[in-house]
Image (spheres, rainbow, N blue to C red):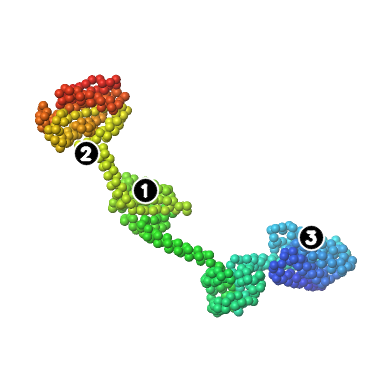
Amino acid sequence: MTSTWQILIGNVAVVMLVVVGWGHARTRLYGLPGAVRSALFGATMGVGAVATMVMSAEFAPGMHIDMRATLLAVSAFFGGPLAAGISGILALAWRIGMGGAGLTPGIIVIVMFVLVGLGGRLLVGRRGPAAWHCLVLGIATALVWIGALVIFAPGPTLPMLINVGLPQALLNVVATGLAGVVFLQARRRSAERDLLAAALAQSPDFNYIKDHEGRFAAVNNTVAEFNGFARPEDMIGKTDFDLMSAERAQATLERERAILAGDTPMLDFEELFVDRTGRERCFSTSKVPLHNAAGQIIGLAGVTRDITVDKRLRQELVESRDTLSYALAEMSDGLAVFDAEGRLVFCNEQYRACFPHTGKLRQPGAYLRDILQAVVETDEQITVPRHNPEAWIDAIVANLAVESEEEINLFDGRWLQLRTRPTSSGSTMVVVADVTRMKLAELALHTTTNKLKELVRTDSLTDLLNRRAFDEAIETETRRSARAGTAFSLLLVDVDQFKAYNDHYGHPAGDECLRLVSQHLKASLKRPGDLAARYGGEEFTAILPDTDADSAYLVAEGFRRALAEARLPHETSERGYLTASVGVATYMPENVHRDALELVRAADEALYSAKGAGRDRVFGTRIAGKGRAGRDAA
C-alpha cells in the first residue's frame, strides 16, 4: 500500500510540475499562432505523460501504475484535437517501445484517456470550461482506469481495486481538478495580458513605459511608428536622447526625474512639437510613477495624446464664443432662449432692459409662466386681456414652440415686437425689438391716410361729402335697402336764383351762401346714418336710409323753412331773401328692383316741379314696385 501511494505521489508531483511549468511558459508564447501554441501544449503534455510512465511501477505482468491519464485527458480537453493527437502519439510511442505483455491494454487505455478529454471538450462547446468541468473530467478518467483494471488485470479483482485502482482513481480526480484550475487561471491571466497588450499596442495614443534610468521598457505601435521604427521591440532600451534634440530630451528627462523623486504624477502637460514633416503639433502628456511590490519606484508609465485638432477646435470655439458674446452685447435687440419646459436658459441685458417691471425676474432658470404672471400683476403690458389673464398665459405657454410674431404695448407707451422662432433642438428663441418709433410713425401715417381719404371724399367749401363720395354712398345704400326691403329716400336741393345772387353780391358772398345752406342741410339730418353731400354748384343732396316718403318730406320741409327763416338778403329775388327748392324721391318697401340713377332722376324731376311751381317748395315722389306711385307737393 505504501509503495503504491509513493509511486502515485511521485507521479502527481511530475504532473503538477508540468502543469505549473506550462502555465508560466504560456505567457512567453504571446504572439505565436494558435496552432503552434496548441502543438507545443500537446508536446509538453505528451512529454509529461511519458515522464509519469517512466516513473511507473509494474503491479501485474505488463500492467503499470502511473498518472498519464491526467495529462492526456487535460491535453485533449484544453488543447483540442491537435494537442490531443501530439500528446497521444508521444505516449503511445513510449508505451509501444516499452513492450511487454500489457501492450494492448496500455494502448487502449491511452486512447481512451485522449477520447475522454476530447469528449469533454465537445460537450462544453463554446461556453468554455469551468472548474467543475475539470472535476468531472477527473472522475471520468478515474472510471476509465477502474474499468480497464477490471477488464484487463489478472488475478483477484477486489484486492487489486483496493490496493491499486482506488488510490490511482482518487489521485486522478484530484490531479485533474488541480491541473484544470491551474490551466484556467493561466488562460485567464493570459487572456487579460493579451487584452492589455493588444490595447497598449493598438491604442491611437502614445503609450510607453520607462525604467528608472529613462530607458524605454515598452512602447506601443503608435510610439514606434511616430519615431520611425518598424516594430515596438526596436525601441526597447533607447532613451529620448536617441529620438529628439538634446535640448528637448534634457528637458523631458528633468521633468521625469522630478516625477520619480517626488512620487508625484504629471497630468495633462501640453507642449508644442514640430514633427519630421515640419508640421507643428500639440501634445498632452500624463506620466505616473510605477512601484514594485515593496513600494519602491521602478519607473514610470506615460500616455501622450495628439491634441492638435482639439486645440484648434477649442481655440475656434473660444473665438466664436467671444464673437457671439460681443454680438449679443452690442446688438440693439433683446434675445432670450427658452427650453422645451418653458424655462429661460439664456438672455442678454437688452432683453431684460426691454421690460422695466419684470426685467429682474427674467433670469436664467425662471419659468415663462411665472414671468407672465408678474406681467399681469404689475400691469406692465396694457394689451393683456383683463377679463381672463390666465387663459392668456396658458395660450402663450402652450404656443411657445410655434413660430409667431406679435406687437405688444407697454405701460410707458413703448411698443415691442416679439418674434418667436423654435429651434431644431427643441428650445425656442425669442427676439425682442423696440419698434416704438416705427409704430408711432405707422399710427401717424394711418391717421394721415384717413385724413387724406376724408379729404378726398369731402367738399372743401362746405365740408359735406363731395360728388364722388355721394355716388359711392348712394350705390351702396340702394343695394342694402333692396336686400333689407326697407324704404329709402333721397333729397335733391337747389338754391333759388343763385346765379343772380352770385352776380350781385360776388363770389366770396356766394361761397358764404353755399356754406350757410350746407350747415342748414346738415342740421336738418337727425340720424347718424343720414348723409349730406354737395351734388354740384349750388345743388345739394341728402341720403336718408330707412326713411319713408312722409318722414323724408318732413326732413326736407324742415330744411326749407330753416333756410327761409334765416332771412339771408337776396335783393334780386322776388322774396328778398335766400330760399331753396327741394325734390324728394322715395323707394317704397315693396320695390325690390332698385337703381340709384332712377332714384336721382326721380328726385331731380320732383325738384324741377318744385321750382316750376314758384320755388321755395318741396315736391316729392314715391317709386313703388311698378314705377312712381304718386307725388306730393308743398
Three-letter amino acid code of the residue under disc 1: Glu
Q: Quadrant of the C terminus?
A: top left
Three-letter amino acid code of the residue under disc 3: Leu
* Label 3 vs 1, first from the N-terminus: 3
> Could you tell me if the residues under marks 2 and 1 are in contact, i.e. CB atoms within 8 Å?
no
Q: Is residue 539 above or below residue 127?
A: above
**Horizontal and vertical percent for residue 571?**
10, 30
Residue located beneath label 2 in the image:
460
* Label 3 vs 2, first from the N-terminus: 3
**Discs 3/2, front:** 2
Residue located beneath label 3 in the image:
115
Three-letter amino acid code of the residue under disc 2: Ser
**Residue beneath the point at 73% across and 61% down:** 136
Question: Which class describes the residues within 10 Å of circle 2: few (<14), some (14-19), or many (20+)?
Answer: few
Question: Which class describes the residues within 10 Å of circle 1: few (<14), some (14-19), or many (20+)?
Answer: few
**Horizontal and vertical percent for residue 510?**
15, 35
Label 1 secondary element: strand
Q: Quadrant of the N terminus?
A: bottom right
Q: Is residue 93 left or right of residue 219?
A: right
Please give the label number shown on residue 406.
1
* Label 2 vs 1, first from the N-terminus: 1
